[in-house]
Image (cartoon, rainbow, N blue to C red):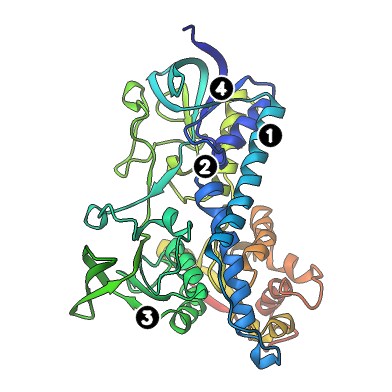
Amino acid sequence: MEPIKTDIVVIGAGPGGYTAAFYAADLGKKVIMIERDKQLGGVCLNRGCIPSKALLNVAHTISLARESGHRGVVFQPPTIDTGKLRAWKDAVVQKLSGGVAALAKARGVQVIQGRGHFEDSETLRVETEEGQQFIKYEKAIIATGSKAAMPKAFDLGNPRVMTSTGALEVEEIPANLLVVGGGYIGMELGTLYAALGSKVVMVEALESILLGVDADLVRPVVAYAKKNFKELRLKAKVSVMATSGKQIKVKMEHEGKQAEELYDRVLVAVGRVPNADDLGLENTKVERDEKGFIKVNNQQQTADEMIYAIGDIAGGILLAHKAFREARNAVEVIVGESTAPAKFVIPAVVFTDPEVAWCGLTELEAKEQGIEVQVAKFPWGASGRALTFDRTDGLTKLIIEPGTERILGVGIVGVGAGELIAECVVAVEMGATAKDLALSVHPHPTLSETIMEAAEVFYGHATHTMARKKVEQSA
């Protein structure tokens, strides 16, 4: 069979892959996109971001109803039809996946379902149901993403020991659920199952959940977990798991004591690993780091001049919107529209209750790097809009450069923090100052006002809270 010739081949049809393919096609390139799954969209759309946020919306609805009693509105405890819940979640996913397929067709991007394997730096072999297909390309973009890590000690071959993929299927609502790992995935799914009715025990080996997030932003999330989970165990470590009938027997160490407990299901959320094996990278000049991620420069170029890598497979922060931006960066370099190293602000959002969001420099990073900053905080207890939600547990903080008063970073914890952070990304990206935010009129009453008032705190004249003129200084 004669090989197909194309300008660009993209391996992987997740957020990074389809963004790269569509952008390259829009710029006039002939593009082939390879995807081994039947549905386009990758982990984010099919087994991650989208289904988890759909289900977390259900959890939010349940929590909101449960907490409305003191307002004089009492709802009956919910009855949950897991089959109907799954069908609704799957319909959301299928609609979006179908949309990606339709956009590929409209743009003339050829989609081949199969597994890609590099024969050399210029040739990709694709294993399909119909047989092998060879592709000769000018440039290749690897966007194969990552998968949930499962330590061998926990891999029992028992579906009751789940990764995030299994947890999002919601096959049942376990009476007792153990969540191993207090990162954003563990906390989000722990929040979901607690709302659905599971007694959740969260185990984290470190001193706090959400490693790397500023402590004052984490504090309200910890408070929620302690109230809504059966238990939050920090500095605890699971050593052994074993099948015990229809349950999982777990041995762990916590506060110097050994414990052996039974759980109906266990969610293992201890990180993600790159999908870089079985790609034939050894037949190219592509290099990988000690964790298996592909090494790239600031233009997403690998050590092989013919091959680029974007998204999770290229390491760094594993977020879909990072992949979106890297995809455009790689394509622009390939078509010759950009040669400068890319610098862009990547926001992060943890969709817990309350949500946590941040962008730019964090207070923790400033301290670790010895960067002198000033920190201005506005507590949501002084926000009229937060009071109408009964959610005054939020906080908005600005990380400000002394002298220039430039906004270096922003952190927000509270309801809707993920939506609020976008304004802050623009502020950091555009080099806005605290004065710019303070003078920008924000609608009242909204949570967005907390951003403006945090800037006013910096100058000592916030309307809705008493603020000292000298704000906190960190170095």
SS assignment at label 2: helix
Residue bearing the label numbered 1: 102
N-terminal of the pair, mark 3 or mark 2, is: 2
Residue 288 spot, x, y in % from top left: 34, 36
Residue bearing the label numbered 2: 42
Q: Residue at x 33, y 21 (%)?
A: 283
Residue bearing the label numbered 4: 8
Q: Is the residue marked by circle 1 packed among few (<14), some (14-19), or many (20+) residues within 10 Å?
A: few
Of 110 and 84, the residue lying toward us = 84
Is residue 399 visible to the viewer in this orientation of the structure?
A: no
| Vertical position of residue 314 compared to residue 186: above or below | above
Q: Amino acid at mark 4?
A: Ile
Q: Amino acid at mark 3?
A: Glu
Left or right of residue 306, residue 29 in this image: right
N-terminal of the pair, mark 4 or mark 1, is: 4
Q: Amino acid at mark 2?
A: Gly
Left or right of residue 113, residue 65 in this image: right
Q: Is the residue marked by circle 4 packed among few (<14), some (14-19), or many (20+) residues within 10 Å?
A: many
Disc sitting over residue 134 in the figure: none
Q: Nearer the viewer, mark 3 or mark 4?
A: 3
Whether the residues at callouts 2 and 4 have beta carbons within 8 Å, the answer is no
| Vertical position of residue 96 compared to residue 198: above or below | above
Q: Residue at x 53, y 47 (%)?
A: 46
Q: CA distance from mark 3 to mark 1?
A: 46 Å
Displayed quadrant of residue 159: bottom left
Residue bearing the label numbered 3: 231
